[in-house]
Structures are given as structure tokens and as C-alpha cells.
Image (spheres, coloured by chain):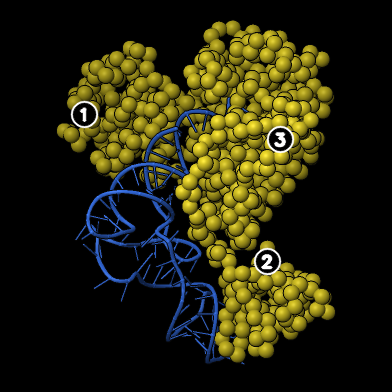
Chain colours: A yellow, B blue
Amino acid sequence: MAGGEGSGSGGDWRRTHTCGELREEHAGQQVVLNGWVASRRNLGGIYFVDLRDRYGLTQVILPEDLEASAKLSREDCVSIVGEVARREAPNEKMPTGLIEVRASSVEKLSSSKTPPFEIEEGSDTAVELRLRYRYLDIRRPDMQRGLMHRSRFIGAMRSAFLAREFAEVETPILTKATPEGARDYLVPSRVHPGEFYALPQSPQIFKQILMVAGMDRYFQVARCFRDEDLRADRQPEFTQLDMEMSFVEEEDVFSAWEGILQDTFREAMGVELPVPFPRLTWHEAMERYGSDKPDTRFGMELIDAAPWVPHSGFGVFQKIIEGGGRVMGITIPGGGEAISRGNVKKLEEVVKTYGAGGLAWWKPGVEGGAGGSIVKFCQDESGAKLREVMGASEGDMCAFVAGDQDVVWKALGALRLHVGKELGMVPETDGAAAGSTGPWNFLWVTRFPMFEWDAEPNDGSDPRWVSLHHPFTAPADWNMSGDPGDMESRAYDLVMNGWELGSGSIRIHREDTQTRVFELLGLGPEEQRQKFGFLLEALSYGAPPHGGFAVGLDRIVALTLGMESIRDVVAFPKTSTASDLMCDAPSSVAGHQMKELFIAHADLPAPRDGEGA
RNA sequence: GGGGUGGUAGUUAAGUUGGUUAUAACGCCGGCCUGUCACGCCGGAGGCCGCGGGUUCGAGUCCCGUCCAUCCCGCCA
């Protein structure tokens, strides 16, 4: 029976049980298991095989003659017929450890070459290899757990939407390029020479049009595409749980999501989320945490040091304030002890990454050089005033950044996080598995600015206003009076443990307001008509007030597993240069394919050499 | 576009101020072993030290370039 590749050797090779389900009560039963050879232990006259499938591991014991004829190697795919028996020597570490299967026959369904890395839990194999042999990587139990968790999580979320009368509607993947936002992935058209589709950055316009169409409540598990540089938490194609609702204001969207997330966490993980989630305005988030996705699980908030500056006699800070800049700091509890001068250098590097000129620091009560870079401006009354402003006392350390508001916020926000992690103030995400209890610190951030000044647009055009969220976001004030830089929008983000999980807004449902926003963004009437005419036209046919939201599923799934890289919850992810190492995409195409699409290479970079292994 | 880290056997790593034949563990191959489960014991094979150039009597080690992976900044409405 052994040796025959595939089936066809007579008996039925199909499994009766999985490798994870046999227990003591099955003892005596005749079973068939299918799976992969995870390990072998040959003791001479007795031969053990651990058989693995998605559900677990089961020990199989082979008599000598079967072993000799089967000649099993690791990762062979096999079918085993045998009888379940209680073990002489149970293994309490295995769920199936009380039993084993005594094989009466073995059929090799398919043999395996020696794998390029060992298929086991907690592999520390280079990502490059794991991605190239993704099918072997995914055989590993931790990858299977991640993908299963993802499946359960999305399934639970889908049920939660359906239970609330949301309709799942698919929108096109081949769509129209948009001038705003990220770079588009383009698809040339064969039928329309010289013209291109774009892959959607999100289904934004379609879902708004579904609202105009009266679908009232829409959701979709939507693939989105953005041709921008990647990060650990960013893939060129990613999945959003996208939704939109009619006749709503912010609070309706928030409470819908609070309920949906509650149901999802309960269903998928057995976790009960407390609702409602706290709300924080964007301005408050920036001012207190230096971030629009603040991690509020610990304190060490930013403090405005401006009230102290006039007392300090420190000309540099004085000038920055007079020039309209900010001087802010954080007080690091116990930092006087915990942070050495060498560490201060590292902190300085952190803030410099975000454009800060430098880091000023002070340890109250410590004199001389060890007391800080600004210790001589912190004597006597100035020191007392600074202690008061910073809420600092002996043993603490204060760190300051001065400059433009944006830089100060960002640099100190990053410093706060860095120090928080170093000093163990940030709770470790306990993500051993689904069922982990968090803490899940959800937070709504509201009232983002409407516009942002873009000094160097991607496309090389002149400096201009751009939407912070997207150009369909409603302004807080429908009249849009005042300076664009000061206008607030009705955009909001959902943040958890310092990660942005999703964003959304109340949309513009009035054609006149939408036109005004486009004008402010520098889109002339002709361009508006050409790029967004269909939307403006739709808005002119009785568009309902509406708003929505989208959650990055890759991120939330990774976070609920305690992972910081989304790569482990995407079955076939791309590298940080957007390549697929398994199928070797992107790749060049045949000349005739190009010709058929009426495209040609322009200024292709010189061919690379030295392309190594 | 910019910065950091890494690339040495199939895998994960070590490799001194540049100096004999480049180590180890796991895996793989062969042998022994009847209760293992990280099985054990004995033996063996396996290296363009990412790639290209340079310095040197001599380069895994120093220099320049380049490719790949990874993390961050910019970018990501």
C-alpha cells in the first residue's frame, strides 16, 4: 500500500477525523487521518510519526515493516489507516496526547522535497524565504491561527452588519483615476487606446452614490489599492470594512460602530468591550499627546512651557515664541534617575527624526552639566516656575522641543511614545491568541482640520490646499467662512492603543458646497466636470445627508493578535518594495501585450546588474 | 527621495587588531537503538562568506558601488 503516489491503491484514503480531534473516548475506533509528516522518531523496532493538519497534531505509531516500506520524509502528505489506542506514555502537552493511532496501513499521497526551512511554530526564518515559500510558511501553526482568526473576525463583523440592516454591495475594481490623494495603480485599456482605468484607493465615491441611490445602509469587505511607499502596517493592497449610512450625524456612525465592534469582539474573541468609546477632538489630541492617534493608556502628556519662557531669560525660546512658534515639553516621572546622559542623546535622535532642531532637557534639583542642557536658565525663581508649569519634582526629567507647532507636536508625541515604551509605561499588548483580553483602548478623534497646505505636491504642481481627509468631507460650517487653514471638518478617526484603525466623515450632500470645496482645492469648473461630474450630478438629484467609515481590517486583525506587522495576517503579502516574492510580481510582459494595449516604455532606467541570489 | 539594521552551509547564528584547512546548533544522508514526543548514540556530506570593483604579500573582516530584505522619516485625501 505504501509507495503508490496519490490514491488508487485500492482502499479509501479519505480521512474520517482531523489530526486535532481524537481523544480517549475514541480508543478502539478504526480511523483514517490525512495530513503532513511533522516529525519522525525512529527508535529501532518502534517508529513514531507526528501527523499535522490545520486542526492539530496526532502521534501515529508504525510497525517496523510499514516504516520500511513507507519511507516517510518530513512534509510528505500521507493517509494513515489505523486504530486509536490509549498511550502507554501520555503527553500532557498535546491536546491529543492521551491517544495515538496504531497504523495498519500508510499511503503516501504526495512526497515532499526537504523543505527550505523547518515547518514549526515560532519560526525565526528570514521573511524573504517565508514569502518565497509562502505555502510552507502557512503550514506553520501560528500562521494558520492568524488566518483563522482573521476569518472568524471578519465573519463576525459581517454578521454584525447584516444584523443591523446593512446591505453588502460590491463596487468596481476597474474604475476612474482620481486627481486627489495617493498615487493610483493604473490599468491600460485595450478597447480604448491610450486610456486607463485606476484601481480604487477606496470605494468612497461609489458608496456615496449608493446613498444617493437610496440604499440607505451599505457595507463591503473592500480591497483598496494605493501606490505609495510601504510600512510594517501598510501594504499596497489592503482590506477595509467599508460602510456608509444615510440620514445620520457623527454620533449615529459612532454608536453603530461601537455596537458592531462590541458584537465582533464578543463573537470572535469572547471579549466584552466597554462602550461608548471616549471622544477627543483632533486639536486636543495634538495638544495633549502630540498625535492624531494618541495612545492614552499612559500619561506623560505634553505641557505648554510658554508661561515659563518669559521667566527663563533664555533668548532662543523667547524668540521662537515671539515668532509664533511653540515651546512644549514632557515631564518624565523618575527620568532623573532612569535616563542617563547617553540616553538623552538617543532621545535627541528621536526628536530630530521628526524635524526638531534639538532637545532641551532639565533634571530639577541637579546642578551643573548633569542637570541638563538648559540648567543655567532654570535657577531660582525660573526653576521654581518651571517646576510649577511642568508639574515636575526632584528625580524627574523634563524634555523640551521648540519650533513650529507641527514639529513640536510630532516630535514630542514621538518622544512620549518612545520614553513610554522604554520605561515600561505602555502595557505590552497581550496577543498570545484570540481570546486575549486586551486592554483594548478605543477612542474617537473628531473635528480634523478641513485643509492642509501642501508646499510640494506629488505631481510637481504649484503649492496648494489639499484635503486632510478627502474632498467629500463635510465642513463643520456649511458656509465655509474664514481661512481654509482654520476650517474644521466633520472627519473622525477610530484609534486603538495608539494605532489608527479607521477613518470616516460626514459627507457633503450639497452640490454647491462640494463645488466650493473643489474650487478651494484648485479644481476649475472644467476639471471638476471631467473628474467628478458624475458625483456632482448625482448630488443634484436629492442626495440624502450621509456619512460613513472604514476600518483597516489587516490592522485590527493583527492588533487583536498582538502583532505589529500586518504581514502575518495577510495570506500573500508583498515586501516593502511591493514585490510578491512567490510569484515574482511585478514582472515584465511580452512585447505583444504592450503593443495590444498601446503602451511603450518611456525613459526606462538602465538595466540592473549585480542582481544577486 | 533620505536615514538605520541585516545578508557567512538547507536554516539560524559565531567568526578577534586583515593571517594556516571558515565554526556551532538544527536540518539532510548512512549506521545502531521497542515507548519516543526537542528521542538518544556513532559516522558523513554540505560554503562563489549577496553581487561587482578597489586597497593589500594576503580580505568573510578595510574602502567604494550595487542588489535584496527589514524598520523609520518624507509620502500614504
Give the residue number, with chain letter if any, for mark 1.
A375
Q: Residue at x 59, y 37 (%)?
A: A501
Q: Is residue A33 above or below residue A130?
A: below
Element class at badge 1: helix
Give the residue number, with chain letter if any, for mark 2.
A53
Q: Left or right of A175: which side holds A47?
A: left
Tell me which numbered mark, 1 or 2, is placed earlier along the sequence.
2
Q: Is residue A211 above or below residue A224?
A: above
- Is residue A285 in view? yes
Disc 2 chain ID: A
- Is residue A509 in view? no
Report the amino acid beneath label 2: Asp
Element class at badge 2: strand
Give the residue number, with chain letter if any, for mark 3.
A595
Q: Left or right of A495: which side holds A76?
A: right
Q: Left or right of A2: which side holds A328?
A: left
Q: Residue at x 37, y 17 (%)?
A: A325
Instruction: Compare residues A17 and A47 and report the one nearer the observer.
Output: A47
